[in-house]
Image (tube, rainbow, N blue to C red):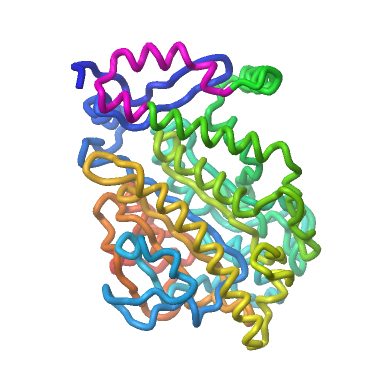
C-alpha cells in the first residue's frame, strides 16, 4: 500500500455528480480523526460505523411456517425462513414481541394502518382521514437526529408502493399512516422514495439539485453513464492508491455501473406500480416486483457501504396490500388471502408469498455480507430488523410478531439464536437496545418499558 492518506469524506466529483467511496485502507487513520471531530466514537479498523435498518413486510405471516420449534442456537428454520439458511448464524429470530398500540383500543377498524404507523413509533395513531394526523417520532428518526450529523444523508427511506399520501385508506385512517414507516415528528411522515432512478440520482447527485437535473438530462441525451462525469477524478485517485485499494475501488465502481445499467433498463418499461388500496392492478408486462425490490436493496447496500447514511427504512409493500403474485402462480390478492379463515390451501399460498419476501431479504443479507470491512463485513457492523406489525393476518393480531434481527451490531449482538421474550414485550424495547448500540440515548420510545437485554 502506498504511504498516502485520504479523508473518509472523499468524493469523485463531476457535473451534478458526487460518488462517495467505500472504506479504503488509505482512509483508516482519517476515519478515527473524523469521529473525534464530530463527537462520534472512534472509527478504527476494528470499530466501523454501525448501521441500522428496518425492512417491513405486509399482512403478517403464516406463523406456523414462520416460528422455529425450538429455542436457542440449535433451532431449525421452518418453511418461510428456509431462504435465510446461509445467514442462520448472522441473525436472531425473536418471538413474543408486540405492538399493543396497533390494537383498536377503542378506535374500531383500521388494523393495517395502525400496524404500519405503530411499527417504528410504538404510539397509537390518531384516527383521522384529514390533515390532523398524529402518531409519534419513529426510532429511525431518533437515530438519524444524532448519527445523521456524521453522514451525507441523515436517513434513507425506500418503498415499492407509491401509494397515496392523503385521504382515507383504511377504515377512516389517513393514507399517511399506511404508506409511511418513518415519522420525523408526531405529524410529519418522511415519505419514502419508490422510483429506483430517483433514489439513484439522490444518492449520487450533487448538493445542487439543478446540476443533478442537468447531469441527468445529458446522460439521457448522450446515453452516458454517471461514471463518465467522474472519470478524470477517478483516474487521479487511482494513481495514488495501493494495489488493494485500487482493486476495491474498481470493484465498487463496477457495482455502481451495473446497478445504474439495471435501473436504466427498468426505466424503459412502465413499472405499473399499484396505486394502493384494495383495487390493485395485476403486475403484468415487463414490470418485475422482484427486480424492483432488489434494485432498492442494492441502493441501500451502496448507501451503507459508502457511509452516505447509517439509517434506513424499506417498505416492501404497504400493510393491506392486495398485490397478486402471478409469477408464483397466485392470482389471489395478498390481503384477501391473509383472511384465510383457516383454509389450508389459502394458508399455503400465504406461506408461499411470505417465503418470496424472505428470499428477497436473503438477497439483501448476501450483498451486505459480501462487502468486507476490516476483519468483518458490512453485515457484521449492522443491525437490521425484518418484520411486520401483524402476526396472524386472519385475526389482525399484533402480538407475537414475526421479527428477525440480522447482523451483529459491531459485535454487540449475539446472533445465531431463536429467542422468546415474555409475551407482549413491547417491540420498542428492542429499539431502545439498538439505539444504545449506535451511541444514541433515549429514555423511552412510544410504549417501551425497558431495554431488551436478551439480544446482547
Quarter-of-image position of residue 56: bottom right
Magenta stretch encompasses residue 186: no
User: In the drawing, does residue 18 fall left or right of residue 95?
Assistant: right
Instruction: Identify the residue at horizontal 34%, vertical 17% (top origin).
Output: 238
Residue 46: image location, x then y, percent: 20, 41
Quadrant containing the N terminus is: top left
Residue 422: image location, x then y, percent: 37, 79
Q: Which residues are magenta?
A: 225-249
User: In the drawing, does residue 207 fall left or right of residue 266?
Assistant: left
User: In the drawing, does residue 92 fall left or right of residue 184?
Assistant: left
Viewer-nearest residue: 193 or 74: 74
Quadrant containing the C terminus is: bottom left
Count all numbered tags in the image, as a single digit: 0
Instruction: Identify the residue at horizontal 77%, vertical 60% (top origin).
Output: 282
Please say if 295 is above or below 135: above
Whether residue 321 is visible, yes or no, is: no
Whether residue 243 is visible, yes or no, is: yes
Residue 76: image location, x then y, percent: 35, 76
Please say if 213 is above or below 173: above
Instruction: Identify the residue at horizontal 67%, vertical 82% (top origin).
Output: 340
Residue 148: image location, x then y, percent: 43, 38
Please say if 403 is above or below 238: below
Main secondary structure found in the magenta portion: helix
Quarter-of-image position of residue 33: top left
Instruction: Identify the residue at horizontal 28%, vertical 59% (top origin).
Output: 413
Please say if 179 is above or below 416: above
Viewer-nearest residue: 31 or 254: 254
Amino acid at each position: 500500500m502506498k504511504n498516502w492518506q485520504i479523508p473518509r469524506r472523499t468524493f469523485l466529483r463531476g457535473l451534478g455528480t458526487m460518488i462517495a467511496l467505500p472504506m479504503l485502507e488509505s482512509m483508516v487513520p482519517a476515519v478515527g480523526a473524523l469521529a473525534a471531530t464530530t463527537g462520534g466514537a472512534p472509527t478504527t479498523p476494528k470499530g466501523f460505523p454501525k448501521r441500522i435498518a428496518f425492512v417491513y413486510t405486509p399482512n403478517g405471516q403464516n406463523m406456523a411456517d414462520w416460528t422455529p420449534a425450538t429455542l436457542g442456537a440449535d433451532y431449525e428454520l421452518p418453511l418461510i425462513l428456509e431462504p435465510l439458511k446461509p445467514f442462520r448464524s448472522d441473525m436472531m429470530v425473536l418471538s413474543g414481541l408486540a405492538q399493543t398500540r396497533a390494537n383498536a383500543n377503542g378506535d374500531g377498524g383500521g388494523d393495517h394502518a395502525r400496524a404500519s404507523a405503530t411499527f417504528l413509533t410504538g404510539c397509537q395513531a390518531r384516527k383521522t382521514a384529514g390533515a390532523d394526523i398524529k402518531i409519534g417520532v419513529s426510532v429511525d428518526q431518533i437515530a438519524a437526529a444524532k448519527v445523521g450529523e456524521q453522514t451525507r444523508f441523515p436517513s434513507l427511506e425506500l418503498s415499492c408502493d407509491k401509494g397515496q399520501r392523503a385521504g382515507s385508506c383504511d377504515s377512516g385512517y389517513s393514507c399517511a399512516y399506511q404508506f409511511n414507516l418513518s415519522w420525523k415528528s408526531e405529524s410529519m411522515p418522511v415519505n419514502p422514495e419508490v422510483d429506483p432512478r430517483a433514489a439513484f440520482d439522490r444518492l449520487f447527485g450533487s448538493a445542487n439539485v439543478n446540476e443533478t437535473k442537468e447531469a441527468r438530462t445529458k446522460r439521457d441525451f448522450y446515453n452516458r453513464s454517471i461514471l463518465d462525469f467522474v472519470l478524470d477524478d477517478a483516474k487521479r485517485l487511482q494513481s495514488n492508491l495501493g494495489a488493494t485499494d485500487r482493486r476495491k475501488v474498481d470493484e465498487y465502481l463496477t457495482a455502481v455501473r451495473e446497478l445504474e445499467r439495471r435501473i436504466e433498463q427498468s426505466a424503459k418499461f412502465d413499472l405499473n406500480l399499484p396505486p394502493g388500496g384494495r383495487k390493485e392492478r395485476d403486475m403484468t408486462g415487463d414490470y418485475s416486483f422482484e427486480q424492483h425490490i432488489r434494485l432498492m436493496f442494492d441502493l441501500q447496500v451502496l448507501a451503507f457501504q459508502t457511509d452516505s447514511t447509517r439509517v434506513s427504512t424499506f417498505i416492501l409493500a404497504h400493510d393491506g396490500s392486495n398485490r397478486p403474485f402471478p409469477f408464483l402462480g397466485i392470482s389471489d390478492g395478498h390481503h384477501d388471502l391473509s383472511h384465510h379463515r383457516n383454509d389450508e390451501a389459502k394458508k399455503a399460498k400465504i406461506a408461499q408469498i411470505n417465503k418470496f419476501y424472505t428470499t428477497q431479504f436473503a438477497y439483501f443479507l448476501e450483498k451486505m455480507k459480501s462487502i468486507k470491512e476490516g476483519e468483518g463485513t458490512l453485515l457484521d457492523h449492522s443491525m437490521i430488523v425484518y418484520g411486520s406489525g401483524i402476526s396472524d393476518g386472519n385475526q389482525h393480531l399484533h402480538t407475537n410478531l414475526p421479527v428477525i434481527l440480522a447482523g451483529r451490531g459491531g459485535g454487540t449482538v449475539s446472533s445465531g439464536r431463536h429467542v422468546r421474550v415474555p409475551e407482549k414485550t413491547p417491540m420498542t424495547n428492542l429499539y431502545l437496545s439498538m439505539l444504545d448500540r449506535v451511541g444514541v440515548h433515549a429514555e423511552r420510545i412510544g410504549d417501551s418499558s425497558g431495554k431488551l437485554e436478551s439480544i446482547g
